[in-house]
Amino acid sequence: MEQSNIIVRVAIPEDIIYSSLITDEMAASAQARGTGIAKRSPEYISYKMKEGKAVIALTKENKWVGFCYIEAWGHEKFVANSGLIVAPEFRKTGIAKQIKQKIFQLSREKYPEAKIFGLTTGLAVMKINSDLGYEPVTYSELTDDDKFWEGCKSCVNYDILMSKGRKNCLCTAMLYDPKDHYTPEETAKDFKTNSKIYERFMRLKKNRLLNYLKKKKGEKPHSIFSLFFNL
């Protein structure tokens, strides 16, 4: 699919006709990956569109392609670009990167002083974030707003998050601080240099935390990796 046929723009109230399609695809994608996301209703997605705090991608024939929205936390000190989703037939075309760039730009315009953060289990999203200037950080550097973390309740890994006192989970935290950050060129270069290390770390982290949860439940760990970590 040629990107020249796709328009990425700020969503408008008339785009609410795509809300149910977007939330259905969010749920299907999370299920396919075996991970979880903060579940959102079509009404919530519609609200974000009406607020002007969402980005949508459509073909010139008005076929839905992708979506992402903004949420502000901690008295607008933190902003999350949430719910990034691309329709299956348009994946691996570079559209996700365009959507992320547009929602990042919109976030900077609406909340110029806010720290922009995200949680992801995907290496591809980590690369896109790195290209924008995000850096991997610990969970302690994210918002402590309880309402944000309550959104994780619908995730299949919520028990892990809570058992770790909201200090760790399968997701990798990434942050852009407008007052203290490397240039996008620097963060992109760092990711390219260390991508294999990040990938290995994410695999080990997943194995460690899943085994930790199994041990908490009195089940037998499913991998030899658990022998190498003090849990």
Image: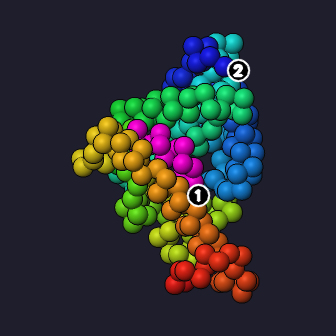
In this view, 136 is above or below 60: below
Q: Quadrant of the N terminus?
A: top right
115 or 206: nearer the eye?
206
Which residue: 56% across, 67% down? 204
Number of other residues with Cα within 10 Å of mark 1, as a class: few under 14, some 14 to 19, many 20 or more: some
Sequence-wise first label, 1 or 2: 2
Inspect the image, locate mark 2, and give the three-letter code of the amino acid beneath it: Lys
Q: Is residue 158 left or right of residue 120?
A: right
Q: Nearer the viewer, mark 1 or mark 2?
A: 2
Q: Nearer the viewer, residue 201 or 76?
A: 201
Q: Which residues are magenta?
A: 117-131
Residue at 33% of width from left, 38% of height from top? Answer: 184
Q: Splitting the image into 4 quarters, where does residue 93 fall?
A: top right
Nearest to the observer: residue 92 or residue 99: 92
Q: Main secondary structure of the magenta part?
A: helix
Name the residue rendered at 65%, 32% in the picture: 91
> Does the stretch in magenta take in 107?
no
The magenta stretch spans residue 125: yes
In the picture provided, is 133 more to the left or to the right than 214? left
Q: Is residue 79 visible in the rendered structure shown here?
A: no
Looking at numbered disc 1 in the image, what kind of residue is underneath it? Gly
Q: Position of residue 99 (x, y in %)?
A: 52, 31
Which residue is disc 1 drawn over?
Answer: 151
Front residue of 18/103: it is 103
Marker disc for residue 198? none
Q: Residues within 10 Å of mark 2 (few under 14, many from 20)?
A: few
- Residue under numbered circle 2: 63
Distance from Cα at disc 1 to Cα at disc 2: 29 Å
| Badge 2 element | loop
| In the image, residue 158 above or below residue 72 | below
